[in-house]
């Protein structure tokens, strides 16, 4: 909702991307359900969707560029060896004799990344210290989220990203990747998450129930309220909802583009 409102308020284009790169977790038919839900809520994309699973060659090209320039290195560490904290740089200077490369990591440069989030304000991250060298190609051969979204944002001409606050921490990593690939970094806005009674975000990972598309106005108003706006009264259709909501969003955020 936030991304749709922001695009419409600024007379931009709103695009849909099916991020199905993590194939073991893909549920058959989920993409069709998502597109049907968006349609039921009156959210029309301005171009046909793209599927990440159809863009593997583009990710391979980007990886080859990074590898040629020395921005990536092979890593033999397992998840258990690395632990929960920042990557300790075990394989940064080469893997131990007799070990094999399992994954490929981006070589994070020293220094602080600063950017302004349109909702969260000024952000500062010392990515090398707080995150360390991060994986862009997994041990199972699949591409990591951080790489593919950077490549796809450039491909789709994305100038502004509006997404959940759980991805705020990823922004610095994506900016570093974009810089290494000579790609622009979009402006970002990270909106608050919708949480359940236990403080967990509503997602398929946490077995959240789908929203009700049979009553689109009620569903839209619930999401609208979560974004900090008063429910829209007297609205009888999704189209009428957007006609009232877009100007209100524009009044609050148009100067913060």
Image (spheres, rainbow, N blue to C red):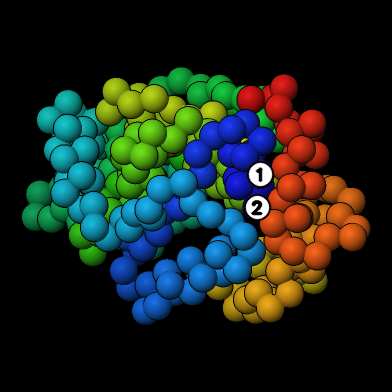
- Residue at 55%, 65% in the rendered image: 39
Q: Which disc number belongs to residue 119?
A: none
- The picture places residue 203, in percent across and down from the top left corner, at 60, 68
In this rendered view, identify the residue nearer to me: 250 or 76: 250
Q: Residues within 10 Å of mark 2 (few under 14, many from 20)?
A: some
Where, by quadrant of the figure, is residue 87 drawn? top left
Q: Secondary structure at mark 1?
A: helix
- Tell whether 253 sits left or right of 73: right
Q: Secondary structure at mark 2?
A: loop
In this rendered view, identify the residue nearer to me: 41 or 243: 243
Relative height, residue 130 to residue 3 (above, below): above
- The picture places residue 143, in percent across and down from the top left corner, at 28, 53
In this rendered view, identify the residue nearer to me: 240 or 125: 240
> Circle 2 sits on which residue?
1
Which image quadrant: the C terminus? Answer: top right
- Residue at 9%, 55% in the rendered image: 98
Relative height, residue 250 to residue 55 (above, below): above
- Tell whether 55 sits left or right of 6: left
- The picture places residue 188, in percent across and down from the top left corner, at 57, 34
The image shows a total of numbered marks equal to 2
Q: Residues within 10 Å of mark 1 (few under 14, many from 20)?
A: many
- Residue at 23%, 64% in the rendered image: 140
- Residue at 34%, 43% in the rendered image: 152
- The picture places residue 23, in percent across and down from the top left corner, at 31, 69
In this rendered view, identify the residue nearer to me: 64 or 232: 232
Relative height, residue 78 to residue 108 (above, below): below
What is the residue that sits farthest to the left in this orientation? 98
> Gap in Å between the C-alphas at discs 1 and 2?
6 Å
Where, by quadrant of the figure, is residue 119 drawn? top right
> Circle 1 sits on which residue?
5
- Tell whether 88 sits left or right of 61: right
Q: Are marks 1 and 2 in contact (CB under 8 Å)?
A: yes
């Amino acid at each position: 909702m936030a991304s749709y409102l922001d695009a419409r308020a600024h007379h931009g284009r709103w695009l849909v991307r099916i991020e199905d790169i993590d194939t073991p977790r893909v549920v058959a038919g989920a993409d069709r359900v998502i597109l049907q839900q968006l349609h039921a809520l009156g959210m029309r994309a301005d171009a046909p969707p793209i599927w990440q699973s159809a863009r593997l060659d583009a990710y391979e090209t980007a990886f080859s560029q990074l590898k040629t320039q020395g921005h990536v290195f092979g890593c033999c560490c397992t998840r258990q060896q690395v632990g929960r904290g920042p990557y300790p740089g075990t394989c940064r200077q080469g893997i131990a004799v007799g070990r094999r490369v399992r994954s490929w990591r981006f070589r994070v440069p020293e220094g602080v990344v600063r950017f302004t989030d349109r909702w969260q304000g000024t952000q500062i991250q010392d990515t090398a210290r707080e995150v360390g060298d991060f994986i862009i190609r997994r041990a199972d051969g699949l591409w990591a989220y951080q790489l593919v979204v950077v490549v796809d944002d450039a491909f789709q001409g994305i100038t502004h990203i509006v997404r959940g606050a759980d991805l705020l921490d990823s922004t610095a990593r994506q900016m570093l990747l974009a810089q290494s690939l000579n790609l622009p970094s979009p402006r970002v806005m990270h909106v608050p998450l919708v949480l359940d009674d236990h403080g967990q975000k509503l997602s398929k990972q946490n077995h959240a129930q789908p929203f009700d598309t049979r009553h689109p106005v009620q569903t839209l108003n619930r999401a609208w309220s979560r974004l900090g706006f008063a429910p829209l009264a007297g609205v009888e259709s999704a189209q009428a909802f957007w006609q009232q909501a877009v100007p209100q969003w524009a009044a609050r955020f148009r100067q913060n583009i």
